[in-house]
Image: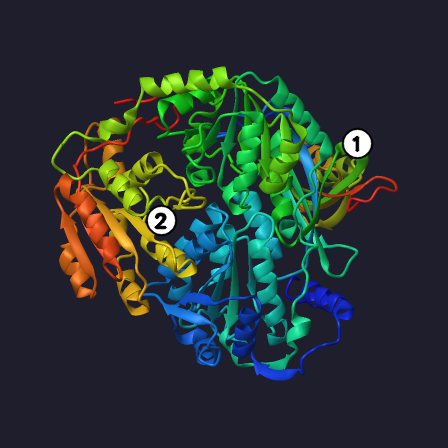
Amino acid sequence: MQVAVPMTQTTGAKQTTQATRSPENEEARELAGSEILCEALVREGVELLYGYPGGTIMPFYDSLTSYPSLHHVLVRHEQAAAHAADGYARATGKVGVCVATSGPGATNLVTGLATAFMDSTPVVAITGQVMWSLVGRDGFQETDILGITQPITKHNFIVERVEDLADIVHEAFQLAQGGRPGPVLVDVPKDIQFAKTLYRPKASVTSFEHYRSTRKPEIETENIASAVKLISQAQRPLIMAGHGVVLSQAYQELQAFAEKSAIPVITTLLGLSAIPETHPLVIGMPGMHGPAHVNNAIGASDLIVAVGMRFDDRVTGKVAGFAPHAQIIHIDIDPSEMHKVKRAAVPIVADAKEALAALTGAIPQGDHKAWLQEIRGWEKAANERGKVLQNEELPDPTTILDAIRKETKGEAIIVTDVGQHQMWTARFYTWTRPNSHITSGGLGTMGFALPAAMGVKMGLPQEAVWVVAGDGGIQMNIQELATLKQQGVALKVAIMNNGYLGMVRQWQEFFHNHNYSETPMTGPDYVKLADAYGLKGMRITRREDVEQAVHEAMETEGTVIIDFVIEAESNVYPMVAQGKPITDMILE
Amino acid sequence: MTSETQGTQAVVAPERTGQSSVSVETARTYTLVILIDERPGAVDRVVGLLRRRRANMQSLTISHSEQSDVTRITAVATDSDVAIGQLVEQLRKVIDVREVNNLSSGQMVERELALIKVTSNPQNACEIIELGRQHGAYVADITITSVTLEVTGNAEQVGNLIHLLQSFGISEVARTGSVALPRGTEESKA
């Protein structure tokens, strides 16, 4: 039934907009699908692609050399292409693009697409597919990548006719960026890449605003009024800012709202760096590894203004015990986030930037000095920063982070992997530069940091980009050192090496009776490894050498890897056990 | 998809072990009309979403609508108000979905068709046919050992007849699942 009427919607949209466009059409040319793909990417402003060639995507790679403005980065594993595109998107706000062949190439993208999906970042993936005439017959390197990626993409397409190709690519870019961003996959069978059709570049950009998911919702003024009322009545209010603030670049709006309302600000893991942590109203990160004063503040709060965050279980702990006395004003661009976890007294479906500006304009100047002081009082009672340190000789996380911060004057972009180092960095770095903290929050993807940082650095080549990773995660995509070398991309990599899968080990210590099942792990000699890739490596075993090593890394051209040997069994404190209320913390 | 859960009566919501603190209270049966663009993979996306979001499905009917390029899906699910509201918003995010409408029971016409094959013998065949006739069922097929009845009605009516026929022995039942339209001049794709 579905196959009978292919793509009527798309072609219909094309015709309507075509009529309204000025007739300055460039001369229609007959092009192959592979060339149309390149043309469409150029017209979308794409400059960088991360990918890996293979059988079914070869026509595209053949055409690529005729489009010098499209700089293709040959990764060493397709997963890295997806993460790099994701990192590029997070750093620049533009759509990241990755390319893979069918079958294993496409399936290797999956983890990266799921990562982008969970964190709402705009990525377009282009995959080759076996010839359309062969699809469905288990051909060599055929996989149903549409089926596989359906739950982890915002949308996906298979191109059945070359005439639809340009529109689909443009549609994919609009979908990836519009509304709540996300990854979109375009699967292009090999014969479609070879097939020729008349291509009119000017006529190809169409508008897809009829899609709800690409629209910015209009703010409902009565909801703003209700929110203002709650804000003016609250005695112990809190702002919780999430990734949505970063995605809509609402940094100034958040700060202005916080200052006018005088409400203390909590930033979730992906909200870190949305507002400077040196600001007197900013109190820290909530949840499983949030400091005690933040979780206690949530417990005592009577109003939470949640902006661009979705009450992830790592933030809320046991939901019934989360902010039990608070009403919620929930601002999110995605209506399906409303009431998903916490019932919102006032749901505001809107872009964070617009909603915060509207609220700021509508509220009177607030004053919550006493409340803020009360929270600050709890902070003093439980300063966990020192608790990481037990061995005085070895490098330790805070010394490493302080050294990076000092050497880069807080201007570096820090890309973390997943685990203990991620939490230490989130907690102790002191984020001041907007969007300087990049990590895989929702999916928690080990192996994310190195390839994602490559995307960050290539998107912002003037900036210093540091990878902070554990010895587990860094080994998951270590092959990208070759890509960095080939591309001449300079990352500075700090490995917090404790010889364990540290976070899993910590859980084993707390919840599995110290049974360190399959968490001790060895790694390579990172100095030799770096050398083998033609890069510089260092191994640092004394705390007093940390600053010098970081300085030397910054002074050295190209990518540098520093293997910091840290204490084997340091823990991240505090910690809330899964399923417990966040005010029920393990403090030491 | 047992007949017991059909109809509009309130039932206790299945406890979710998930993270939501939003109260499940009592569950009701909801009829969702989902209009989607007739494109490759569109049905797949809707059905996949219903599974991923743990919709408590009672029936699912997929067919053409009055528009050549629009497929009409009627999904009957049992859950709390909040959970259904969530599901509707999730469905609306699917790119192929044009409209989702939650039809309330008072304002819709709902029908499903069932074929019920009842084990019979020459002594009780007439009794089976008569019971069916009283419930508006037709005889679709008859053999020496079976009577196949065709019945149309809302899910509750169909469920009732199946229940009554169980004493004769039912060898097979095929139900289409519900389709529904709003009553009167209202349009579901308003």
Q: Contact (CB < 8 A) between labels 2 and 1?
A: no
- Image x and y of residue A223, in percent: 69, 30
Q: Nearer the viewer, residue B101 or B51?
A: B101
Q: Nearer the viewer, residue A342 or A25?
A: A25
Disc 2 is placed on an element classified as loop
- Image x and y of residue A316, in percent: 45, 28
* Chain letter belonging to callout 2: A
In the picture provided, is A409 more to the left or to the right than A395?
Answer: right
Category of crowding for the residue at label 1, using alpha-carbon neighbours closer than 10 angstroms: few (below 14), some (14–19), many (at least 20): few
- Image x and y of residue A306, in percent: 54, 31
What mark, if any, has residue B22 been given in the picture? none
Whether residue A82 is visible: yes
Query: Which residue is found at the position 35% from the left and 44% from the top?
Result: A410
Question: Can you identify the residue that label 2 sits on?
Answer: A412
Q: Indicate how the structure is coloured in the image.
A: rainbow
Q: Amino acid at mark 2?
A: Ala
Question: Can you identify the residue that label 1 sits on?
Answer: B106
